[in-house]
Image (tube, helix red, strand yellow):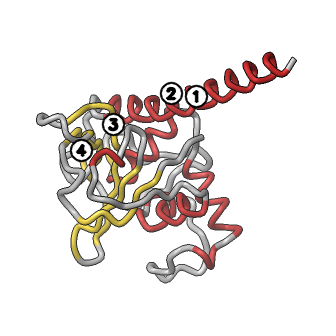
Amino acid sequence: MRKIFFVILIFCFNLGFAQSTVQKLTLSNSALELTKQKVTYDPSYFSIDYPNGDVPGDKGVCTDVVIRAYRKLGFDLQKEVHEDMKAHFNLYPQIWGLKTTDKNIDHRRVPNLMTYFNRQGAKKAITNNPKDYIPGDIVCWNLGGAITHIGIVVNKKSNDGKRYLIVHNIGSGQVLEDCLFDFKIIGHYRYNL
């Protein structure tokens, strides 16, 4: 009887690990799909539907890459961030002088996504070791001053094979680039659904 229990326990553990790995690869693949769409970098404020709202499909910024990749998995960051901010507004950055939430833009701000991922227990160590960044991870950077950026680690390797590439939008649309260590990393998250 103990042998059967042990076998079942091992099977369940392996199944759980396999599902976690599949999810990361799926986020990676959904991010890679986004690079096939022509998108112009546009930081304009848009009034959008709620829930599942999006800016026009041919426009976007770095956060829209993350939002759209998760949405392809059936997860609405607009709704989740809005609800968490509404319940815990004082825990989110007060950079923009707002007195309440704004479902049109809150999820499109890097500091808010960083706070959300932290609150969900997704925070990982920030290191200089490329092996610590795996497909499906979210990385945030400081580009200088108060300018922040976000992207998704995907399952494609750099030309030298030493690190995974990033899907992001830093001004040239949703692109795949070898830029993991190009800027100061200020956030590293592994957010599993």
Label 1 sits on what residue type? Gln
Q: Which mark is residue 22?
A: 2
Q: Which residue is mark 3?
A: 154
Q: Which mark is residue 50?
A: none
Label 4 sits on what residue type? Gly
Q: Nearer the viewer, residue 53 or 189?
A: 189
Q: Are the residues at dot 3 and dot 4 in contact (C-beta closer than 8 Å)?
A: no
Q: CA distance from mark 1 to mark 2?
A: 5 Å
Q: Which mark is residue 19?
A: 1
- At x 24%, y 44%, the residue is 173
Instruction: Give the label, 3 or 4, closer to the camera.
Output: 3
Assess disc 1: are there few (<14), some (14-19) or many (≥20) residues with their C-alpha within 10 Å of its C-alpha: few
Q: Is residue 62 shown left or right of residue 144?
A: right
Q: Which residue is mark 4?
A: 173
Please determine whether, in this image, residue 149 is positioned above or below residue 132: below
Mark before the other along the chain sequence, 3 or 4: 3
Q: Is residue 125 shown left or right of residue 102?
A: left
Instruction: Give the label, 2 or 4, closer to the camera.
Output: 2
Mark before the other along the chain sequence, 1 or 4: 1
Label 2 sits on what residue type? Val
Please determine whether, in this image, residue 145 is positioned above or below residue 59: below
Mark before the other along the chain sequence, 1 or 3: 1
Estimate the x, y position of residue 108 in percent, counting from the top left: 44, 58
* Quadrant of the frame with the C terminus: top right
Q: CA distance from mark 3 to mark 4?
A: 16 Å
Q: Are the residues at dot 1 and dot 2 in contact (C-beta closer than 8 Å)?
A: yes
Instruction: Give the label, 1 or 3, closer to the camera.
Output: 1
Q: CA distance from mark 2 to mark 4?
A: 27 Å
